[in-house]
Image (cartoon, helix red, strand yellow):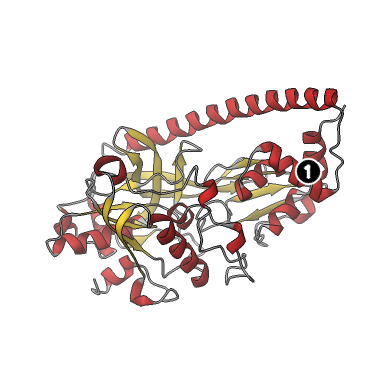
Amino acid sequence: MTTLSQKVKAEVSLRALAERFGVSWDQGKSRPARGDYWASCPFHGDATSSFDLVEPNGRGGFFKCFGCEAKGTAVDFHIAAYGGTPRDALKALADGAGIEREESPEVRAARQARLDADLARNAAAAAAEARRNLARARAVWLSARAFGASPILSQYLRARGIDLDALGGVPPVLRFAPDLPCYDGQDAQGRRRLIWRGPAMVAAIGTAGDFRGVHRTWITPTGRARLESGAKVPKQWLGETGRVFGSPVRLSPVTDCVIVGEGIETTLAVLAAMWRKGRRHWSAEAALSLGALAGPADPAGVGPGLGANGKPLPSAIPDFDVLKNPGWMPAGLLNVGRVRRLLILGEGSAKCAATAERHGRRAQAKLLTTAERVKLVVPRRDWGSGLDYADLAEMGEI
């Protein structure tokens, strides 16, 4: 007897599901004749096409993101996109595809037993993969220890406008790796494709005593490393799948006045400016992606229409019903109770200004319950300025 799960995974088009969610395929990397499609990942802040979907026969299919490590079938995609349980996803996908799901009690019980066994196996496999990713991340972090805050790392941060004198040097959460490989996508043999190798800034993700991964930025003494095409080498996360999303790079000791931004450099630039003015009661954390900063969105607030990046405009309203994993939250909540002041750095250099603004507004709405005062700011008060706060620091504007 074919189970509903098997029917859904075999008969539902994962590619069509992804497209309805707003995924736009990278025409340069995709190979439609092979059923191999690449795109920016819809589940994390992805500056490059790290999301691979394989569906040669027009239905079924499997996806994997080589940035955040999300992967699975149409059922897994539905859960990641819309929340809910595997059973909720199966029902929604079956109904959408016209797949009959009426069963006798005996068949239903047998199917549920098999589904529970599948879920247990998948959970065990996911846990094992999370442990492997965490071990890989720890190895990268420990290997960078010998080089600490090298001259190249200091030069890079100063070039980004960050006042290291005000900070007392490079924060210990940042280390330097002199020769780190960067992989993106796969080659013709299905192996990870090496696109760059060289010096990198390695940041520890997590909180004290709870290491969850690393964030890697490939650098030169004067700025971000660039590929032969001129594009910046993509930043990448590596860590414990399922827990690394929303975990911060904590750039200073915890206080009850917190600066939070998407990126490490822009957040560090504002912290340095604050400390230079004697406001050392401020602390700073980088959320690493707009999605992690904003948290889950209320589906009812989506749209209308598409943003400049070709994706549906996200909701500016948090989905408070599914905030089991709300993304980034102030570490100070665990240390000092309610945060006194919270400064959210909006992103003015995103590909789509409307999308960035909605993420910023959603972050503000989510975090209003965590602090006495919450303020959202954006460079030059313009979501489409093309600038972040590190850019302003480079120009001497903060």
Quarter of the image with the N terminus in it: top right
Left/right placement of residue 281 relative to residue 12 reads left
Image quarter of residue 179: top left
Q: Residue at x 48, y 43 (%)?
A: 325
Q: Residue at x 68, y 62 (%)?
A: 27
Image quarter of residue 289: bottom left
Q: Residue at x 26, y 36 (%)?
A: 146
User: Measured along the vertical axis of the image, is residue 372 above or below residue 337?
Assistant: below
User: Measured along the vertical axis of the image, is residue 64 above or below residue 223?
Assistant: above
Image quarter of residue 308: bottom right
Residue 58 visible from this viewpoint: no
Across and down, in percent, residue 117 comes to 69, 23
Across and down, in percent, residue 236 comes to 46, 49
Who is closer to the viewer here, 206 or 331?
331
Across and down, in percent, residue 247 comes to 40, 44
What residue type is disc 1 on? Gly
Q: Residue at x 72, y 53 (%)?
A: 17
Name the residue carrying label 1: 60
Across and down, in percent, residue 265 comes to 32, 58
